[in-house]
Amino acid sequence: MTAYSTTVRTMHLLTNAAWFGGSLMGAVALNPAARKGDDAQQQAEIADEGWHRWGPVQGAAIGLHLLSGIAIVADNRRRVAAHPPTTAAVVLKTALTGVAIAASAAAYRLGAELGDAQRADRDATTGRTARLLARRMETLQWATPAATAGLLALDAYLGEQQRGVAGLLDRPSGPLSPSSRS
């Protein structure tokens, strides 16, 4: 493996970690913390402030993740084309990346709509709209961390595939392996 490959793979993993971690932090901490605001308008302002600060970082992470993914596939094009398990994993990873991008974009759009509805003058229609959007966001906010966690798992799988002959000489590890029973 070359320094180029190591650098590109490192960038790919770090950007996925930022994408996963930022979306998970939003679902676990920022969005619930924003609900501690005194009223709907203040809650919307708190959430908006956090997401506006994180948005450029997450956008850069997603962009660099896509570029480094393309570089990894180009660097391993023969393996991707000739090794069926790798081909299947790359196809699955590409589809899951699409799901993660779609979930991120949908959450961004829905979050903006929710913020607008929470800041608007409250009438019966606006209140119903805000509650409906909030219920949708409660579910949608978990889609990006779930998809990006799947990407991390596929990266681990693909890394294990590259161990090659040297990896075949390793002793099995795990709860049922002979080395763990000693």
Image (tube, rainbow, N blue to C red):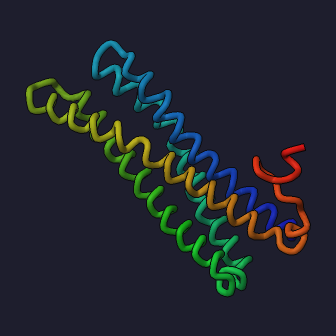
Is 94 situated above or below 127?
Answer: below
Q: Is residue 56 above or below residue 151?
A: above
Query: In the visual, does 71 lie left or right of 56?
Result: right
- Quadrant in the picture for residue 85: bottom right
Report the residue at 47% width, 56% height from top. Answer: 100
Judge whether 15 appears above or below 155 on screen. Answer: above
Percent across and percent down for residue 65 are: 61, 59
As drawn, the residue found furthest toward the top would be 38
Q: Nearer the viewer, residue 176 or 148?
A: 176
In which quadrant is the N terminus drawn?
bottom right
Q: Quadrant of the C terminus?
A: top right
Residue that sits furthest to the left in the current view:
124
Horizontal and vertical percent for residue 51?
A: 46, 36
Q: Is residue 18 above or below residue 82?
A: above
Disc tally is 0
Q: Which residue: 69% across, 58% down?
A: 156
Q: Viewed as shown, does residue 159 lie left or right of 94?
A: right
**Residue at left offset 9%, top offset 32%:** 125
In the shown orientation, is residue 157 left or right of residue 34? Answer: right
Residue 78: image x %, image y %? 71, 85
The residue under the point 31% across, 44% down is 110
Question: Which of the 4 image quarters holds residue 133?
Answer: top left
Q: Nearer the viewer, residue 171 or 93?
A: 171
Residue 81: x %, y % from top left: 65, 85
